[in-house]
Image (cartoon, rainbow, N blue to C red):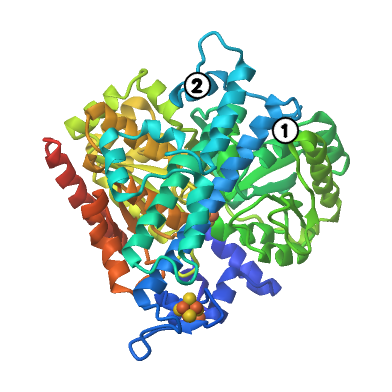
């Protein structure tokens, strides 16, 4: 096995990896070793399994599959389906929020309510629903219908494109990139990539971009906005992160996955006095709900609950031996968590019929019965406390302080109600530009080394960083999510963030909340009367692994945002596809991807880009 020091930058992770080796518990790193080297064809994207005349693997020696498809076609199809998997994940999550809104409107969800009524009315106004003098529930019903229709096939474009600058929409229309309906684009990609359909790589990629845009400006954005409506729009607050948020004297319940519909209810149940009383009867001092991955981000942003870890910490959290239950919904949940839970007293509980895990305790979590089910789940966690083996508990380190809760609404409020102060700070060069650093961990990359490394490099250059997803915990553990982190930033950021009392790295939420970032970009572009591609901004996913991250990257690029990936997707087997991704898209949508595994070089690339964009806007470098 590789030395533990090479696997991660964190002490808490190293301590648990040592414990895992001591206790004979297998982790993601061990399995990566078993899987290495990977299949070369698959790495290049030149393998096709789309029909049973194959499977085919193309190379210089055998350049066409049985049907005649070449590497360009095969790579484009594979990448198209890959992105579509991600768009489907985010968007189906968004749909679940519409279904909860529907249940609220129909009076079928007694445990949920509309928390941010103002936001619901604002949203309705944005998509052209009459709000003047109307009842909340009537407007909510119209909004629910409008968003459901965004998933269908009869619209010319998804409704929240109302936020996009006209010039950008014209570009999309010309290219055939306008997202019409979320499910429609997803289904059409499956059609196009069936044998004998779209056999022109650039054409397939244009549709991949359209599908990604349906995610960013459709499914994800609806997910974010309705989560705010139902659970409240985030406001700045303090919390903590790392494995030490797990408490030796408490019942520890970790929520993992993405959908706040489940985790919010779990948290509410865990706060009930009867639940706490039962935990105390069993000798605990209380119940501690902490987060993993994105449902953790959701609860962190809105409720300030602590974050136990990101993607590569999920196995390690259980290895502390102090976790009574892991409650999951869907996405990014390693099935290995079931086996690791089995090595301890930990109960592994799944809650979604569309994401079941063999060996888990299953709940078919429904809006109508949410609180009752949440109580049952929390009770399972509490009772498990009695089974904990104190001799196997090891919780490393001390929790690190973080600041969270930066929705666009909160940011605008902090700025005094308009974007003007932000525009001025950018014009003055105090904030030279902004980069959203988002996404995952990948065991092929030293855990969080690039996530943290790039963030630090950028703020030194007075480039504001916005983080979401699993980069949140990385930035937080590195001490970058507190106001004091301005000491690590350049003079301009130090001045502006210091005056506002905010960190130079802002936590903007979960992965679907990347929609908040593109919304902010669109608002800035509209304010300046330019296209998004004219802004001094960028996006990065340094340690990405998932289909969803690819969808996010592609909707960022298609929206006009220069986007960095720390390692390439499986497209290098086609020069056409690779060239399009890293340069050709620039001519089409005004932005492209760039691939760079080094944090310092990446920061320099962003710096150059931001200089050029500032110059284009007539600003000093
Ligand atoms: Fe092979 Fe073509 Fe079938 Fe793909 S679609 S498996 S390349 S024959
Ligand atoms: Ni979003 Fe990436 Fe984390 Fe999963 S939770 S691992 S997609 S960043
Ligand atoms: Fe393969």
Judged left or right of residue 258, residue 167 is: left
Q: Which residue is mark 2?
A: 129
Q: Looking at the image, which residue is at 80% across and 36% down?
A: 369
| SS class, disc 2 | loop
SS category of the residue bearing label 1: helix
Which of 289/538 is in front?
538
Q: Residue at horizontal 30%, vertical 47%?
A: 561
Q: Hey, which residue is sitting farthest top in the picture? A: 133
Task: State which mark lies toward you, 2 or 1.
Answer: 2
Cα distance, mark 2 to mark 1?
33 Å
Q: Is residue 557 left or right of residue 318?
A: left
Dot 2 or dot 1: first in sequence order is 2
The C terminus is located in which quarter? top left
Q: Nearer the viewer, residue 281 or 588?
A: 588
In this view, 340 is above or below 295: below
Residue 506: name its quadrant: top left
Where residue 29 sits in the image (x, y, percent)?
A: 55, 72
> Does the rendering let one see residue 6?
yes
Q: Is mark 2 within 8 Å of ligand 2?
A: no
Image quarter of residue 535:
top left
Q: Which residue is mark 1?
A: 268
Q: Is residue 621 visible?
A: no
Above or below 235: residue 403: below
Q: Nearer the viewer, residue 16 or 342?
A: 342
Q: Give the class, few, some or many, for how many residues have Cα within 10 Å of label 2's Cα (few <14, many ≥20).
A: some
- The quarter of the rendered structure image containing the N terminus is bottom right
Residue 88: x percent and y percent? 54, 52
Instruction: Count residues near mark 1 (Cα–Cα under 10 Å), then give few for <14, some for 14-19, many for 20+.
Output: some
């Amino acid at each position: 096995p590789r030395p533990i020091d090479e696997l991660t930058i964190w002490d808490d992770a190293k301590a648990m990896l040592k414990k895992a080796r001591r206790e004979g518990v297998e982790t993601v790193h061990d399995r990566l070793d078993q899987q290495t080297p990977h299949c070369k064809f698959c790495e290049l994207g030149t393998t096709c399994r789309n029909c049973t005349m194959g499977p085919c693997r193309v190379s210089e020696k055998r350049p066409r599959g049985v049907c005649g498809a070449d590497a360009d076609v095969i790579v484009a199809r594979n990448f198209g389906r890959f992105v579509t998997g991600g768009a489907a994940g985010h968007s189906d999550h968004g749909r679940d929020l519409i279904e909860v809104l529907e249940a609220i409107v129909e009076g079928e969800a007694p445990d949920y309510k509309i928390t941010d009524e103002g936001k619901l009315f604002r949203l309705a106004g944005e998509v052209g629903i009459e709000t003047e003098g109307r009842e909340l529930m009537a407007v909510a019903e119209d909004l629910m219908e409008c968003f459901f229709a965004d998933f269908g096939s009869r619209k010319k474009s998804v409704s929240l494109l109302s936020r996009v600058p006209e010039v950008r929409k014209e570009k999309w229309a010309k290219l055939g990139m306008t997202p019409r309906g979320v499910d429609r684009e997803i289904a059409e990609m499956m059609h196009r990539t069936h044998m004998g359909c779209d056999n022109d790589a650039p054409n397939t990629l244009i549709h991949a971009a359209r599908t990604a845009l349906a995610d960013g400006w459709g499914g994800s954005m609806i997910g974010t906005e309705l989560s705010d409506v139902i659970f409240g729009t985030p406001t700045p607050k303090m919390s903590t992160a790392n494995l030490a948020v797990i408490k030796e004297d408490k019942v520890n319940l970790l929520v993992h996955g993405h959908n706040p519909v489940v985790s919010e209810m779990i948290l509410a149940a865990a706060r009930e006095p009867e639940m706490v009383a039962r935990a105390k009867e069993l000798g605990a001092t209380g119940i501690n709900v902490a987060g993993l991955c994105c449902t953790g981000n959701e609860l962190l942003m809105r409720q300030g609950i602590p974050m136990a870890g990101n993607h590569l910490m999920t196995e390690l959290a259980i290895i502390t031996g102090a976790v009574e239950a892991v409650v999951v919904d869907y996405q990014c949940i390693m099935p290995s968590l079931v086996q690791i839970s089995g090595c301890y007293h930990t109960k592994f509980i799944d809650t979604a019929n569309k994401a079941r895990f063999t060996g888990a305790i299953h709940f078919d979590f429904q809006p109508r019965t949410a609180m009752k089910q949440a109580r049952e789940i929390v009770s399972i966690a509490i009772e498990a406390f009695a089974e904990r083996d104190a001799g196997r508990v090891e919780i490393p380190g001390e929790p690190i302080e973080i600041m969270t809760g930066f929705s666009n609404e909160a940011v605008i409020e902090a700025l005094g109600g308009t974007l003007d102060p932000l525009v001025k700070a950018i014009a003055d060069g105090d904030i030279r530009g902004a980069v959203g650093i988002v996404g995952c961990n990948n065991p092929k990359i030293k855990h969080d080394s690039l996530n943290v490394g790039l963030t630090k490099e950028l703020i030194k250059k007075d480039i504001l960083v916005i983080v979401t997803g699993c980069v949140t915990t990385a930035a937080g553990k590195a001490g970058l999510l507190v106001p004091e982190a301005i000491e690590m930033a350049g003079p301009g950021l130090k001045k502006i963030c210091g005056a506002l009392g905010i960190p130079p790295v802002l936590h903007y939420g979960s992965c679907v909340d990347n929609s908040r970032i593109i919304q902010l970009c669109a608002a800035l572009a509209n304010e300046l009367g330019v296209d998004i591609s004219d802004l001094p901004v960028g996006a990065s996913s340094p340690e990405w692994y998932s289909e969803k991250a690819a969808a996010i990257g592609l909707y960022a690029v298609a929206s006009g945002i220069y986007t960095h990936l720390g390692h390439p997707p499986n497209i290098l087997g086609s020069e056409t596809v690779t060239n399009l991704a890293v340069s050709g898209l620039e001519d089409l949508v005004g932005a492209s991807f760039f691939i760079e595994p080094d944090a310092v070089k990446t920061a320099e690339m962003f710096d150059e880009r931001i200089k050029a964009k500032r110059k284009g806007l007539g600003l000093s470098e």
